[in-house]
């Protein structure tokens, strides 16, 4: 029996849903990406711990997927296994001013739950189409808020099975960076501290933030959000627009006419199209402004 089949059998026994040769384009907001050899949906912690151990024994690489909203997956796909968390990982519980969220909880659900419990401070999460796990790893933020600023601690499991937690300080939140990007841990959940507020006021702020996004961002097309990090003292979108690149298209990938910081999939875009457009933008912006744009979106898969 080959190693992938051994991992597949073990995952089924632990209650995971299993798919073979699953197109990653079905699991990324860009709608781009070739097949993952094995795609596993993990329902709870014990199954995850067993999966990590078995994959290590079999030397099969594992890739943790959140909502796929910050990923550019290769056209050749991902070798080994991709797994995503579900079931009990989606839970959101409130305890006083704290929300305890599983890694698979949607950020929109977190901001709605906070409003339901009259807790303020999580409104900025409402329009970010990620999960708690992906948001903690990326230190996701918007409209002046960052998840690092409201997080008390995160629970995690290392590939060797060690379960633990890190405080906000230990996670070392900075602009779109945390220690989780470098230490290989899988985030299991996060405890957020919010403040008492007025539910109606919170809901109205959420509606306003969503309205702003619909107005400014090309939400009608698949994308991975802002493709570049914000360079110090500038906005990537403004620099790209200044260089006359709005609307520039390579294959199915286009610099959005609505917000030049977004590359959108106009239909049938490949990872190669997006990479070629990223290079073109980086070269032109560097040449014309002297500023080097760094990708925020994570590239994954077989080169
Ligand atoms: C329309 C649009 C608007 C956006 N707006 C914003 C915005 O305003 N602000 C912002 O910060 N981002 C924004 N994003 C980007 C994206 O939503 C965030 O980066 C989000 O936090 C990614 O979460 P995810 O669950 O989709 O992670 P994914 O894209 O699935 O993964 C991102 C990284 O996190 C890792 N990961 C995911 N889950 C776990 C886990 N449990 N444990 C360990 N690692 C994990 C993955 O391996 C990967 O390296 C936007 C994206 C889109 C499409």
Image: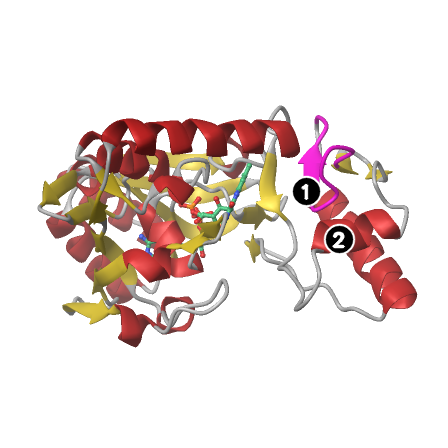
Point out the stretch of residues depicted in magenta.
256-267
Secondary structure beneath disc 2?
A: helix
Q: In this view, does 113 lie to the left or right of 64?
A: left
Q: Where is residue 236 in the image (x, y as percent from the top left)?
A: 71, 55
Looking at the image, can residue 259 be seen?
yes
Q: Main secondary structure of the magenta part?
A: loop
Q: Is residue 195 left or right of residue 253?
A: left
Please state which of residues 185 and 61 is positioned toward the viewer in this rendering. 185
Which quarter shows the C terminus?
bottom right
Q: Is residue 61 above or below residue 77?
A: below
Q: Is residue 24 left or right of residue 124?
A: right
Q: Is residue 218 above or below residue 295?
A: above
Tell me the residue that label 1 is attached to: 262
The number of discs equals: 2
Residue 278 bears which disc, if any?
2
Q: Is residue 127 left or right of residue 251?
A: left
Q: Residue placed at 79% from the left, 68% from the top?
A: 291
Q: Residue placed at 74% from the left, 36% from the top?
A: 256
The Cα–Cα distance between marks 2 and 1, rounded to whole angstroms, is 11 Å
Q: Position of residue 191 (x, y in %)?
A: 19, 54
Secondary structure beneath disc 1?
A: strand
Q: Position of residue 31 (x, y in %)?
A: 58, 33
Looking at the image, can residue 55 be seen?
no
| Mark 2 or 1, nearer chain start | 1
Q: Residue placed at 9% from the left, 46% from the top?
A: 96
Q: Is mark 1 within 8 Å of ligand 1?
A: yes
Q: Residue placed at 62% from the left, 47% from the top?
A: 226
Q: Where is residue 21 in the image (x, y as percent from the top left)?
A: 46, 37
Quarter of the view holding residue 193:
bottom left
Quarter of the view holding residue 255:
top right
Please state which of residues 216 and 220 is positioned toward the viewer in this rendering. 216
């Amino acid at each position: 029996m080959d190693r992938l089949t051994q991992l597949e059998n073990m995952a089924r026994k632990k209650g995971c849903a299993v798919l073979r040769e699953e197109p990653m384009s079905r699991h990324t907001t860009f709608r781009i990406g070739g097949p993952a050899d094995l795609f596993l949906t993990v329902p709870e912690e014990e199954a995850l711990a067993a999966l990590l151990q078995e994959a290590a024994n079999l030397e099969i690489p594992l890739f943790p997927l959140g909502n796929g909203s910050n990923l550019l997956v290769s056209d050749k796909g991902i070798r080994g296994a991709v797994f995503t968390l579900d079931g009990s990982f989606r839970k959101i519980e409130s305890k006083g001013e704290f929300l305890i969220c599983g890694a698979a909880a949607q950020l929109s659900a977190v901001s709605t739950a906070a409003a339901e419990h009259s807790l303020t401070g999580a409104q900025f999460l409402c329009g970010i189409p990620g999960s708690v796990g992906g948001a903690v790893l990326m230190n996701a933020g918007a409209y002046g808020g960052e998840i690092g600023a409201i997080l008390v601690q995160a629970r995690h499991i290392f590939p060797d099975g060690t379960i633990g937690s890190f405080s906000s300080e230990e996670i070392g939140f900075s602009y779109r960076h945390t220690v989780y990007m470098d230490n290989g841990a899988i985030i299991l959940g996060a405890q957020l501290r919010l403040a008492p507020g007025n539910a109606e006021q919170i809901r109205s702020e959420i509606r306003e933030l969503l309205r702003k996004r619909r107005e400014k961002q090309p939400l009608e097309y698949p994308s991975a959000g802002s493709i570049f990090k914000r360079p110090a003292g500038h906005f990537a979108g403004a620099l790209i627009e200044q260089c006359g690149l709005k609307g520039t298209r390579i294959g199915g990938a286009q610099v959005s006419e609505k917000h030049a910081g977004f590359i959108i999939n106009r239909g049938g875009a490949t990872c190669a199209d997006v990479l070629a457009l990223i290079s073109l933008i980086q070269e032109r912006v560097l040449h014309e402004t002297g500023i080097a744009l760094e990708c925020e979106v994570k590239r994954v898969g077989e080169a």
